[in-house]
Image (cartoon, helix red, strand yellow):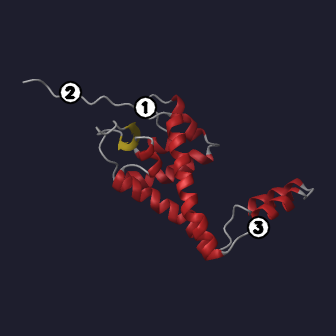
Amino acid sequence: MSAPVARQVEYAGFWIRVGAFVVDSLAISIVLTPLGYALFGRRDTMGELLAAQGIEDPMTRLLALSSLLAPASLGEFLLNYGLPALAVVLFWMYKSATPGKMATLTAIADAKTLGPPTQRQCVVRYLGYFVSIFTLGLGFLWIAWDRRKQGFHDKMAGTVVVKVPKPPR
């Protein structure tokens, strides 16, 4: 009787993960933009952006530009930040992947067992995104250099992103 063959793991690198992020961002925008307009009306963001460009004082200009990113109400905050966070974590918990990861044939796995991530790992991984962002993006760039292609958020959660074999036709 022969020993079982160990699964060959191929970690998903930086660029394939960027591609998954772009797909996810487009999917979220396609869903949230019309929903946001229906619930909260249309902001004249381009007009506000052009007006801010005309402000001479650099600090005042920066504050005016940053206000464009701030939600105008609790409802807008929940729609733009809460709903995407909930969706991402639920996709990770139940599919081990977001639509972008599914499209790029990648999935999140527990770094030790290569099994599905736990609920705790999914939440810690999402919160770890903020660490990756607040280090001027170094936490995401780290994926390019790390042996197992882990970003700071992956290391914090004990997860890896692996390539999934194509299903047979």
Task: Report x, y in % for residue 78.
Answer: 56, 69
In the displayed structure, would residue 73 be above or below residue 120? below
111 vs 4, left or right, is right
Instruction: Residue at the far front: name it.
Output: 169
Kind of residue at badge 2 = Val
Give the secondary structure at mark 1.
Answer: loop
Residue at image point 39% right, 37% down: 162
Give the secondary structure at mark 2.
Answer: loop
Residue 50 image-quadrant placement: bottom right
167 vs 27, left or right, is left
Nearer the observer: mark 3 or 1; the answer is 3
Task: Report x, y in % for residue 111.
Answer: 36, 39
87 vs 137, left or right, is left
Circles 3 and 1, Cβ within 8 Å, touching? The answer is no
Residue 90 image-quadrant placement: bottom left
Which of the two labelled residues, at mark 2 and mark 3, occupies the earlier sequence position?
2
Give the secondary structure at mark 3.
Answer: loop
In 3D space, how far apart are the residues under numbered discs 2 and 1 (Cα atoms)?
A: 21 Å
Label 3 CA crowd tier, 10 Å (few <14, some 14–19, many 20+): few
Residue at image point 68% right, 72% down: 72
Kind of residue at badge 1 = Arg
In the displayed structure, would residue 142 be above or below residue 91? above
Disc ID at residue 148: 1
Task: Report x, y in % for residue 91.
Answer: 40, 56
Residue at image point 61% right, 42% down: 137
Q: Which residue is mark 3?
A: 44
Kind of residue at badge 3 = Asp
